[in-house]
Amino acid sequence: MMIQKSKHLVVFTGAGISTSCGIPDFRGPKGIWTLQREGKALPEASLPFHRAVPSMTHMALVELEKAGILKFIISQNIDGLHLRSGIPREKLAELHGNSFMETCPSCGAEYLRDFEVETIGLKDTSRRCSDANCGAKLRDTVLDWEDALPPKEMNPAERHCKMADIVLCLGTSLQITPACNLPLKALRGGGKIVIVNLQKTPKDKKASLVIHGRVDKVISGVMEILKMQIPPFVRIDLFQIILSQALSLDKKFVNWTLRILSVHGQKATLPFIKSVEVSFLDNQDFKSATLESQPFLLKRRTVKEKSFELVLRLNCSEGCGSSHVEVNIPVDFKVSADSLNLDKEVVFRRLRDEAVQDFFCGKNAVIERKSIPFPKSEVTVYATVTNVIRYTQELKTLAIDSLSNGDMKRQLASVNGSAISRKRSRRPKRKSRY
């Protein structure tokens, strides 16, 4: 009811909203610090960090934002799941950074990657800004112990908390300063604080409502009472295929090279592809090949006049909802391919709609094609659906006292019939200065 009546709802999230994604929290029963204090080993990761998918709570927040109810999210998490779920960047403050984000210190451009950035502590990475007028070295965005909270994130977070009539704190112990004091700023303007967390927090006495329970269970109940559906999550990944060619000295043959690469640079890995099988449709003159390691590269020689069709089977890595993605590429070296630059968001929307309707991974579409004069090459960028997940709300009856007890298993219907469950030891944050 408080959410329904809210005029400016702000959500403040911590590690507890990602535990059902297989990412451990710090102070929970199976949290990193809890296990370390008890002298127990940290669990092994069952899936790579970069394949973690948003929880039921993440996707419920997406729906609340689209409905105009949720105005802003402040997160202490570095897992990047709010952005991946579909929350607009301008409505999100990531106080401690994002493991998948690089930023340009010169022009301010941000680059969201499909791989975990290799450094932390706002250090230079191995890549540069792609703006032709800039080219500065990029930096990671994850704070180390001694780093102050960045004003770019802290200022809008503080402003929205002051404007908020409700600050909903989800899955956070509210113990890391100065971030934990942000919700208190709502009280000065007459706003209220609601806390949903398994354990007690130091701010419980300041809250108008406290629920000691699992965030997914509580938010599922909220969405059911509001008669709002939790949307499915569709993950779309990008890759590029480069086909280069050069005439032989006698001009009778074409020496060509096929490369399957990351869109984040030729030195970046493709984390969701483990191997590539190359075959040739209806053509016995060419020998098939399997590319087992990155960079995925194949070199061949063809008679100049000969046209053919390449069939690529991109075998997906663990955590993807499909075993493979298939791409067919007609090749005719006598004809130049037309350039293409489609609206990426339109293509994404179509892929998402089709994936949800058919409940199927592996669909792909071209979003860009261009020619490079030297070496003569055709570069094509593809988007492909690698995960489709539906969330089922199963609360037949709901009472306020039931929110504090028990556990509701996260209901996932994924295309490979399994839910993501992984554990990753994360370095705890030191209290940051601002």
Image (spheres, rainbow, N blue to C red):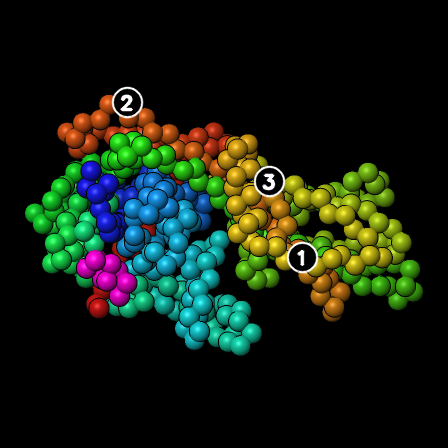
**Magenta highlight range:** 154-163
Inspect the image, locate mark 2, and give the three-letter code of the amino acid beneath it: Lys
Inspect the image, locate mark 3, and give the three-letter code of the amino acid beneath it: Lys
Whether the residues at callouts 1 and 3 have beta carbons within 8 Å, the answer is no
The image shows residue 100, relative to residue 18, as above or below, that is below
Label 3, on which residue?
363
Label 1, on which residue?
340
Given residues 64 and 378, the one toward you in this image is 64
Examine the structure image and report whether residue 155 is included in the region drawn in magenta. Answer: yes
Give the mark nearest the N terminus, 1 or 2. 1
Inspect the image, locate mark 1, and give the three-letter code of the amino acid beneath it: Leu
Give the mark nearest the N terminus, 1 or 3. 1
Where's residue 188, x and y in %? Answer: 11, 58
Q: Residue 396: give its label.
A: 2
Residue at image coords 29%, 43%: 17
The image shows residue 137, relative to residue 195, as above or below, that is below
